[in-house]
Amino acid sequence: MNLLGIVLSGLAISTSLNMLVQILWWRAIASMPLAALIVAIAFVGTAVGAAAWILVVRRLIQPWFERTALTAMVTAGFCPSCGYGLAELNPEPDGCRVCPECGAAWRMEP
């Protein structure tokens, strides 16, 4: 048997097993008592709610944390990109200090 035959037979077995699992799944749901169905729906709802909360945290809290960390590093006199000390460098005419390590420019309050 060549590689194509092995792949096709594997797909056929996989498709057959997938169909069998789906049939068994729907039969289990159909014969499921109401309480178990409610628990299953609650479990799925909890999982969806947790995923939504993770997205909220990533969209709202993470940018705030990154801005706070960036401000703290610049205030302490370090480059937020690479950690190089910027306190000893002279500011450019625009008020920024250019990091000699990574080339990032940061405006530091005197």
Image: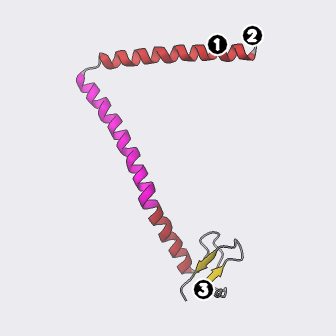
Contact flag, marks 2 and 3 (Cβ < 8 Å):
no
Q: Which mark is residue 9?
A: 1
Left or right of residue 26: residue 9: right
| Element type where label 2 sits in the image | loop
Image quarter where the C terminus lies is bottom right
The chief SS type of the magenta part is helix
* Magenta part of the chain: 34-62
Q: How crowded is mark 3: few (under 14 residues within 10 Å), some or many (20 or more)?
A: some
Residue 84 location, quadrant: bottom right
**Farthest top residue in view:** 1
Where does residue 88 sit, x and y in percent of width and height? 65, 86
Q: Distance between the residues labelled 1 and 3?
A: 68 Å
Q: Is residue 20 above or below residue 74?
A: above
Residue at the outermost left position:
34
Which residue is pictured at 39% across the width and 47% down the height?
52
* Residue sitting at x 47%, y 63%: 63
Q: Is 90 drawn above or below residue 12 in the view shown?
A: below
Residue annotated with mark 3: 95
- 1 and 3 marks in contact (CB < 8 Å): no
Q: Nearer the viewer, mark 2 or mark 3?
A: 3
Tell me the amino acid under the disc marked 3.
Gly
Amino acid on which the number 2 mark rests in the picture: Met
Q: Is residue 108 above or below residue 48?
A: below
Q: Do the residues labelled 1 and 2 touch (CB within 8 Å)?
A: yes
Q: Is residue 26 above or below residue 48?
A: above
